[in-house]
Each structure stands twice: as C-alpha cells, then as structure tokens.
Image (spheres, rainbow, N blue to C red):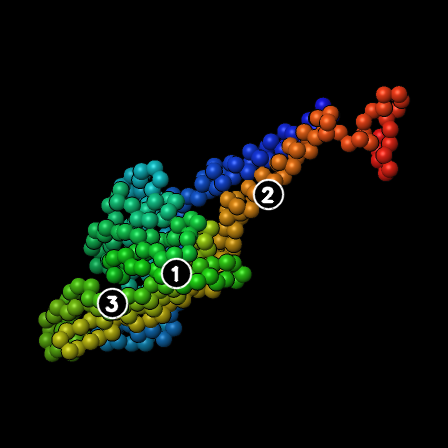
Amino acid sequence: MSLRSRVLVPAGGLAVLGAVLLPTQVAPRLETLPADPDVTTTLLAADAEILDVETQSTVVRDLTLTSYTDGYRATGSPPDGVAQWRTEATIASDDGLVRSQTWEVAAFDERTGRASDCCEGFRVTATGAAEPVSRSGQVLKFPFRTEPVDHEVWDPALGAPVTAAYVGEDTVDGVRAYEFRSVVPPTDVGPTTVPASIMGIASVQDVEVRQVYEGERTVWVEPNTGGLLDVRQRVRQTLVSDETVVVALDATFVLGAESRADGVEQLRQGIHLGRMRATYPLGLGIAGLLLVAGGAVRLSPRGRPAGRARSRTSRRPSRTPGGRR
C-alpha cells in the first residue's frame, strides 16, 4: 500500500463519516435554544395614540418598546428539552413617561419553540398582579428548519394562539427569509374597570368597560434557525362602553435599526446550520467517496494505470508520455 493510498482511504472514510454525522448528530445538537439568554430588543412606534392616565385622554406620542429576555429559574430547572424564559417589556413615550410595564414567564420546547405545559406560566401586570397563562403554539420564535407553511403562534395581547399565514420568500439585508403574517380582527378580550371620567361620564366612581383588541403582525423568519430577522406589528386596543369608544393604544411598531442589525448579523450564520443538513454533507460525502475510490484504485493492481506498471524485463519503471517515475 502506497503512502498516498494509506492517507486517502482513511481521509475518505472520515469525510463520509462527517457527511453522516453533520445532519444526524452535529446539527441537532446546535438546534437547541440557550437556557439563559441575554437579549434586549427595541421596537419603535411614531405618532402613536395612547391613553394618558394623568389627563385621562388619548394623546399622540412617539413610543419605544424595550423587551429584555433572560432565563428563569425561580421554580427550579425545567425538564430536559424545555427552555424557560422571562421577558420584561416596557413602553415609554418621548416625553420620558413609562406608559406600561409587564413581564412574563414562558416555557417551550428548546428545539421547536412550541409552548410546553411542563411548567406554570404566568404574566405580571403593571399592578403587580400575577395572572396564570396557559400558552400554545410558537412562543418567542419559529422552529429550527421552519417550513414555508402556516404556523400557530401565541398572541399575548389576545391570550390565545393565532395563525401566522405564510406570505412568501423574501430577503432581509441579503439574508433569505420567510414572511409570515397574522391578523386579529376586533375581538373582545374581557372586561376591566376604569375611572368613569375616561369614558366621559360625570362620576367619581369606576365603571366596567369592555376591552377590544385588534392587530396585525408581520415577521421575517430566518428558516434554518427560526429566528426573527425583522418585525412589524400594528396594535389597536380600545375601551368600549355602550356607544362610547376610547382609544387606549393605536400604534405600529417596527424593529429598531440597532436591534435589526444585531439580529441579522447573528442569524446570518444560520445559513451554515442549513448547509450542515444538505450542502455540506453532500459535498463531504462526494469528496469522501472520491478519496476512497482514489485510494482503492491505488491499492488494486488491476486499477493501476498501465504506464505505472513495473516492467518484467527492466529494473527501472517505464514511463508514459508526460508521466513521472
């Protein structure tokens, strides 16, 4: 066996092995969400309408929604294969006032991103009250290897899953993306109490009103990782009492430039995760088979090129045109 053959056959075997391991062992290990993320995302809404508590009237302001996500361990570690994250969201206006603040804890499958019922989920409102939440559908992201089909996603404002319809393929700053859109028609999400003066009623008492929510959310998803490259969300919340309708929030949020740039830069690497399942294994497999075949040719006497065969009558190897010893 020549030195070249001794090298080529093992190298080819390793390449073929790599072609098998990348899609079956390596890629699945990478397709898991971190247990303790540290992510801050900013969304902006210009000329939004929001109910001002001090004046008890709807005002127009520029809004900034800042969302911070990390791991949650107050109730102990979740089961294997489940991620449990806490998300704190704050809406502030351009006059420096904090308009709302909530935080939620959600558990979901670390690979698919779908809600898990393993751990108690809840939502803490601005009043400090904890509300239990039983989620379903995709929670904070889409699955690894997202398919270009409709998906059920959790809408926290509605408190129920909605259909994110597949719109088509697009690009975000040069990165391939799937576009999905969910639409919620005006929906009664339950009663609440507000000061009567907000509803134009001359009274110092609180009155019960209905909360009506509607929205439209468009997301651009990097398909290999299921991460969000871009987001645009329109939210409209009103308070209704008989014929009186008061706008509590009417805003269209878009992803801030810095958050979008950071997300695109990170998710741009997702193309390599996709290639681990297709292009890279195929290339390694072909290269491995060629290396093995090349080594086998040099191992097999029948496979030797004629010009390399040793002459029975000469002590020196024969030469072919342009050949080497």
Residue at horizontal 65 percent and vertical 37 percent from the top = 290
Badge 1 marks a residue whose secondary structure is strand
User: For mark 2, does the 10 Å Cα neighbourhood hold few (<14), some (14 to 19), or many (20 or more) residues?
Assistant: some
Is residue 242 toward the left or the right of residue 149 in the image? Answer: left
Q: Which residue is mark 2?
A: 283
Looking at the image, residue 228 lies above or below residue 210: above
Give percent across and percent down for residue 168. 44, 62
Is residue 124 toward the left or the right of residue 9 in the image? Answer: left
Is residue 101 toward the left or the right of residue 44 in the image? Answer: left
Q: CA distance from mark 2 to mark 3?
A: 51 Å
What amino acid does circle 3 point to?
Answer: Tyr
Looking at the image, residue 309 lies above or below residue 109: above
What amino acid does circle 2 point to?
Answer: Gly
Q: CA distance from mark 3 to mark 1?
A: 23 Å
Badge 3 marks a residue whose secondary structure is strand
Residue 148: image quadrant is bottom left
| Mark sitting on residue 213 | 3
Q: Nearer the viewer, residue 6 or 213?
A: 6
Give percent across and percent down for residue 250. 30, 72
| Mark sitting on residue 285 | none
**Mark 2 vs 1, N-terminal side:** 1
Give percent across and percent down for residue 276. 52, 44
